[in-house]
Image (cartoon, rainbow, N blue to C red):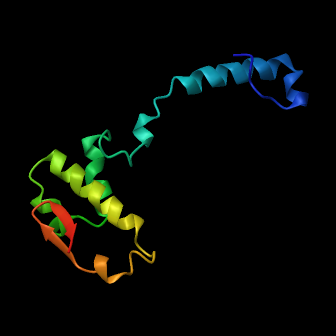
């Protein structure tokens, strides 16, 4: 792992090169998939209630109507899609003004 980019004053010091190599090896072992919470299909099920709260689909807004974990994941994905257009010209159009909640899906009328 000697391909680390260190500033020239530090690169000439062997102690910093060794320290940088040790740090790089440790950082390479860290599993970063736990940080990818917005990939709803692969996120741990324990994160779903927090995502539901963040995207405003808790309780009667849809969460209680979802029968299983897969439906909850779909509900969150659809809420993310709706939030993408919030505050844009498309989001202010009359077409997105009427949203009907039927069981576990959101559809625009």
Q: Tell whether 17 sits left or right of 42.
A: right
Give the quadrant of the N terminus. top right
In the image, residue 7 above or below residue 25: below
| Residue closer to the observer: 104 or 54 | 104
On the image, the x and y values in percent for residue 33 come to: 42, 35
Q: Residue at x 23, y 79 (%)?
A: 98
In the image, residue 63 above or below residue 74: below
On the image, the x and y values in percent for residue 42 come to: 31, 38
Residue furthest to the bottom:
94
Q: Tell whether 59 sits left or right of 16.
A: left
Residue 53 in view in this figure: yes
On the image, the x and y values in percent for residue 4 come to: 74, 24
Q: Residue at x 83, y 16 (%)?
A: 14
On the image, the x and y values in percent for residue 85 come to: 40, 69
| Residue closer to the observer: 84 or 6 | 84
- Answer with the quarter of the image where residue 103 lies: bottom left
């Amino acid at each position: 792992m000697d391909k680390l980019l260190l500033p020239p004053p530090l690169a000439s010091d062997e102690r910093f090169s060794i320290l940088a190599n040790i740090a790089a090896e440790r950082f390479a072992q860290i599993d970063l998939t736990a940080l990818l919470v917005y990939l709803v299909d692969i996120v741990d099920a324990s994160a779903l209630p927090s995502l539901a709260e963040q995207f405003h689909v808790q309780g009667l807004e849809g969460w209680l109507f979802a029968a299983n974990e897969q439906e909850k994941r779909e509900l969150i994905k659809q809420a993310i899609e709706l939030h993408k257009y919030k505050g844009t010209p498309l989001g202010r159009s009359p077409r997105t003004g009427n949203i009907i909640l039927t069981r576990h899906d959101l559809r625009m009328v």
